[in-house]
Amino acid sequence: MCGIIGFISRKKRLIRGDKIAIALDSLKERGNGQGSGYVGYGIYPDYKDYYALHVFLKNTPTYHKIIDKVKNILSKYGVVVKDEEIPVKEGVLKKEFIPWRFFYDFHDSYKDIENDLMVNIVMEINDKVNGAFVFSSGKNLGVFKATGWPKEVAEFYRLDEYEGYMWLAHARYPTNTRGWWGGAHPFNILNWSVVHNGEITSYGTNKRYVESFGYKCRMFTDTEVVAYIFDLLIRKHKLPVEYALSAIAPKFWDEIERMDEEERRIHEAIRMTYGPAALNGPFAIVVGTHEGMIFMNGDIEKNNTMIGLTDRIKLRPLVAAEKDDLVFVSSEEAAIRRICPELDKVEMPDAGSPVIVRIE
Amino acid sequence: MEEECKMIPSAVPPKYKVEIDRDRCMLCGRCVEECSWGVYRKEKDRIVIYSNRCGACQRCIVMCPRDAITVRRNITCWRDHPLWTAEVREDIINQSKTGCVLLSGMGNAKEYPTYFDRIVLDACQVTNPSIDPLREPMELRTYIGKKPKKLEFEFVEEEIDGKKIKKAKLKTKIAPNLKLETPIMIAHMSYGALSLNAHLAMAKAVKECGTYMGSGEGGLHKALYPYADHIITQVASGRFGVNVDYLNRGAAIEIKIGQGSKPGIGGHLPGEKVTAEVSMTRMIPEGTDAISPAPHHDIYSIEDLAQLVRSLKEATRWKKPVFVKIAAVHNVAAIANGIATSDADAVVIDGFKGGTGAAPKVFRDHVGIPIEMAIAAVDERLREEGVRNEVSIIASGGIRNSADVFKAIALGADAVYIGTAAMVALGCRVCGRCYTGQCAWGIATQRPELVNRLDVEEGARRVANLIKAWTLEIKELLGAAGINSIESLRGNRDRLRGIGLNEVELKALGIKHAGF
Ligand code: SF4
Ligand code: SF4
């Protein structure tokens, strides 16, 4: 059991981070204080063209050496424009790690492949640099997470000092691996961020699948793999979003048999080709997406969107709601009403059918 | 009769002791009729017993109307010796007498570890709900064949109701695959080694269960044509029965390079089993030994194999998936990788416990590696090469129950072949004398009076029952593991734990020990 919530302003209106923290706080029943986290999109307008890498550094007296090692890797392909400790309020949490951020720009010669390179860099740091874990690697967005209750983590990271047009948040009740900072949600790679309630029973299959494409799962928890699957299917393989989501929460064979010839062929091909990417087990996820997604009708999405999705038999709750330009997705309606008591519309998405919210 | 007795020498003590309860016996003579091995002879008011001919196939026991027959292990005292076991001494006595290779049937009979029995499965408790297969869909459908690495779409403008809209169309072509409703297939056992009735029963069963069987290397008897769309035709080194009709008739083609029970050697069907019908199907003269050479004489390297795969595909206009079967040997991962990078659609790995009608005992007991290790090694290697998902892995050799199937898939197989288990469903008692052609159950024989004992309909029902029962159990196990489609189990070694295995074994299997 975990609590998840996300909202997005379709007008890209900027909203302060403490708003999402209040909502998440009302979901604390669904967590146990062993991990809470947030991601805000649009929070670094001054550095919006640079990758913002958030890295956990093991809190030892020699943590500067770890920074040097990270910089060594980064300097191979570009320049660190700025780096600093992420501002935190001391004394709120036991500082297991020092959260550090690097604003990073690739050399021009690498611009065409910068996203792929960034994925490799994240994998390399997480795999090879002892005591460093990259937990956020997108542009103009940042993940803030730690072991602690929702309120504590928000206070620690001084979330009220950031403004974003999309926020996702998660209160964790760890059931598969110990609670540690890196194990808290959201999980992020590039501009993909995932918060997840559930347990992935297909994890072994999914992990080995993404690993054969060069991703490395190093966070000791199952959600990480979801971010990589989105990146692989939608950004790298360029599957139309609707089909990619159908690979992740596959249609039942019975349903596929009833489709018209062409759709049937497509869904059969999806299940044959992407079977190992299917997420099994109970889940509800909210995903902040990378730009450039292609829709079935050929539209290319320039912005980041918010996607809500449950497993195909909906063993975890998910509710969606709207108020003016705001769209919310959450485990519980109560959390939404906490920050937005009057709603225009509330609905329960069907099992396995996605809610996709795009910016106008 | 007296003469025939002399022909069956018994220099070693009989293995079994056959006894008739004389009070119960009513001298009906049923056992005399039923035992095809000549254990019983009727003599006025007595049944005479030649225990040395008995192989414990239990036919007489089951058929005796008075339950008067008991077959026991005949425990003759050999002086105990840890090195010179009774078996070793018996083998030497037999070989010194005949000067021949020792033949044996069925799988490896040595006490090597059965890793399946050292692996346990996972189930959900609290944190994720188990799924009830009676209430929720549970999908076992499996496609065997080449898959693309990724799908490509193109966007085509279409006019619908006067409006122009773009639509994603699938550009990637999907190669022909076999569609299995359950990941259990029946292994290649040839007509010739098996009776026509046994083949028919299995063919009917697989058709009913939405799965497939192998033809074996003996061609396809006409009576099996109606089931050919559920039969994978085999091309072995002897090329018996192979022509373009045969290839086109089946659902897929399998090139047999090797077999788990006798890696590195060919096959031998004794002339006694080559009856008129068998000779026609195999396209060889009646009564001659059918000998498959050890290698394919047109395959001396991996390129040659790739060429044969392509030739078979050309011959069938790229409409049939082509599988390649190899025995699980030390280097199985590299060989499988070579196969995966040819045009082959699936690699079949046959473990060293795989059954057979006849194998030299020394091969059966000493050559090859366990199927569990082979699956793990091949799956891992194909992943390292980034091709695992493009080619299927079929595991065979010693799969005994639904748990074995489940574990094989979690270790990395797509589907399994069962051989011995399907035969046992038909009545086989694993007596291990299939090569003699005298199978009392009408399975591994061509003698019409014995073949007739096997009722095709009843046999089909039993084999289908077995497949259905295992399928049901697999669904239950999946549900308990919180998984509702088989593709999420494939290679999911996280859901397995070893018990009592050392670190090297765990590493080879790619699993953790229980407690971790
Ligand atoms: S060989 Fe079979 S039928 Fe013959 S006596 Fe032994 S058990 Fe009975
Ligand atoms: S098929 Fe017949 S001969 Fe072969 S092991 Fe089974 S019962 Fe014995």
Image (cartoon, helix red, strand yellow):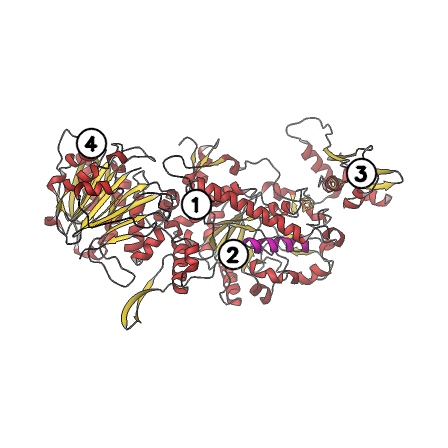
Chain under numbered label 2: B
User: Which residue is under mark 2?
Assistant: B323
Disc 3 to disc 4, C-alpha distance: 83 Å
Sequence-first tag of 1 and 3:
3
Mark 2 Cα shell of 10 Å, populated few (<14), some (14-19), many (≥20)? many
Sequence-first tag of 1 and 2:
2
Q: Position of residue B69 (x, y in %)?
A: 76, 36
Q: Residue furthest top?
A: B80
- Callout 2 amino acid: Phe
Q: Position of residue A315 (x, y in %)?
A: 35, 43
**Which quadrant of the render holds ligand 1?**
top right
- Tag 4's secondary structure? loop
For discs 1 and 2, the disc positioned in front in the rendered view: 1
**In the image: residue A201, left or right of residue B357:** left
Tell if the residue under mark 2 belongs to the same chain as the one under mark 3: yes
Disc 1 to disc 2, C-alpha distance: 22 Å
